[in-house]
Image: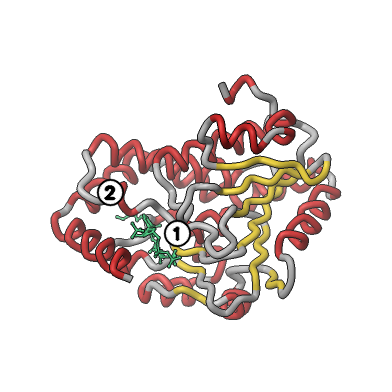
């Protein structure tokens, strides 16, 4: 049903769509060249197989409209951008589901990171692990100044490790030493700290969404050919690295997650979350 609707129609009837079919995201158009993709999977926008697949297919749909130049990624939950991967996908899963799940995450990353669209991450709330991956995959990151918020890669706290391409993305974003420190300690950075290390580009006191729209419009004014070629030059290497190792990465992920020790760690982490 979704594929028969044009992106413009999506924008005109978001309420109708979210009540009739569960797309897990809402798409709106604040101006003719800017689209907004709002993550909408309560309670915490965690990335399940269905959520990752939906985001990817909506990005592709938006991308297919030549009038759209910029995409803002944001959340319907003002306190949480995304809690990262849906941890329940990694708890006692079947090997088949786990492989498909991981492929959906790889595909989401490759689609968002290499889209021709200029992407602005509008981070109004917490953005741990997979949430930070989504943010780092964008071209520009704007975050609310709220000191209680955290952004970073906390995988080690769950007893797991970030895959090589996420580690590489982090190194490219914040530099080698900071990445090594942040990854090993599973550190979540406050907005001020994130700004200092280049994990976000701007922090905002007031309406972070308004600033994101402004930046999206600024990007949309830059001639497309040059900006797309530049993006390809900056990002091509990491895209090719992962594309050349898709199967190896799926194998590494599934083996690591299915180990009994990892499973115990994930179970303990899930329990600690629900006890809070
Ligand atoms: C070999 C390994 C290879 C690759 C590694 C894969 C890479 C993994 C990256 C990841 O993304 S792993 C996920 C990491 N995410 C987190 O650690 C975030 C955990 N969540 C939180 O810290 C908090 O929930 C929050 C700060 C995001 C929000 O706090 P709050 O508003 O107080 O909500 P609750 O904690 O009460 O959560 C509500 C509800 O949602 C459940 N939940 C939270 N996060 C997740 C999640 N990521 N996946 C699944 N479910 C999650 C939480 O358990 C609560 O459920 P209830 O049933 O108790 O209501």
Q: Secondary structure at mark 2?
A: helix
Q: Position of residue 211 (x, y in %)?
A: 76, 62
Q: Quadrant of ligand 1?
A: bottom left
The answer to whether residue 247 is left or right of residue 171 is left
| Mark 2 Cα-neighbour bin, 10 Å: few <14, some 14–19, many ≥20 | few
Q: Which of the pair 237/121 is nearer the observer?
A: 121
Q: Position of residue 246 (x, y in %)?
A: 38, 40
Q: Position of residue 254 (x, y in %)?
A: 26, 46
Disc 1: which residue: 83
Disc 2: which residue: 252
Res 12 quadrant in image: top right
Question: Which residue: 67% across, 64% down?
Answer: 142
Q: Which mark is residue 25?
A: none
Q: Is mark 2 within 8 Å of ligand 1?
A: yes
Say which of marks 2 and 1 sits in front: 1
The scheme the figure's colours follow is secondary structure
Looking at the rendered image, the quarter that the C terminus falls into is: bottom left
| Mark 1 Cα-neighbour bin, 10 Å: few <14, some 14–19, many ≥20 | many
From this view, report whether residue 189 is shown above or below residue 262. below
Q: Which of the pair 218/171 is nearer the observer?
A: 218
Give the number of callouts: 2
The CA span between labels 2 and 1 is 23 Å
Q: Secondary structure at mark 1?
A: loop
Looking at the rendered image, the quarter that the N terminus falls into is: top right
Q: Work out whether mark 2 precedes mark 1 in sequence or the reverse, and give the earlier one.
A: 1
Task: Determine whether label 2 and label 1 are within 8 Å by CB.
Answer: no
Q: Which of the pair 5/106 is nearer the observer?
A: 5
Q: Is mark 1 within 8 Å of ligand 1?
A: yes
Question: Which residue: 65% across, 70% down?
Answer: 144
Question: Which residue: 80% across, 34% down?
Answer: 67
Q: Position of residue 80 (x, y in %)?
A: 52, 62
Res 122 quadrant in image: bottom right
């Amino acid at each position: 049903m979704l594929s028969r609707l044009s992106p413009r129609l999506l924008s005109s009837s978001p309420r109708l769509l979210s009540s009739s079919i569960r797309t897990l995201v809402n798409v709106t158009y604040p101006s003719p060249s800017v689209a907004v993709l709002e993550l909408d999977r309560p309670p915490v926008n965690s990335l399940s197989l269905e959520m990752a697949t939906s985001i990817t297919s909506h990005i592709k749909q938006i991308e297919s409209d030549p009038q759209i130049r910029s995409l803002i990624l944001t959340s319907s939950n003002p306190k949480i951008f995304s809690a990262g991967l849906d941890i329940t996908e990694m708890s006692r899963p079947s090997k088949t589901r786990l492989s498909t799940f991981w492929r959906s995450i790889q595909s989401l990353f490759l689609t968002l990171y290499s889209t021709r669209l200029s992407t602005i991450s509008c981070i109004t709330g917490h953005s741990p692990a997979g949430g930070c991956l989504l943010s780092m995959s964008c071209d520009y990151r704007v975050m609310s100044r709220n000191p209680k918020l955290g952004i970073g890669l906390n995988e080690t706290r769950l007893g797991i490790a970030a895959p090589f391409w996420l580690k590489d993305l982090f190194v490219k974003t914040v530099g080698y030493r900071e990445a090594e420190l942040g990854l090993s300690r599973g550190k979540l950075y406050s907005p001020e700290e994130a700004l200092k290390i280049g994990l976000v580009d701007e922090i905002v006191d007031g309406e972070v969404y308004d600033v994101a729209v402004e930046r999206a419009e600024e990007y949309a004014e830059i001639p497309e050919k040059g900006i797309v070629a530049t993006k390809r030059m900056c990002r091509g290497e990491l895209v090719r690295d992962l594309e050349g190792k898709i199967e190896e990465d799926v194998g590494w992920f599934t083996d690591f997650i299915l180990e009994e020790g990892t499973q115990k760690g994930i179970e303990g982490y899930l329990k600690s979350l629900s006890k809070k």
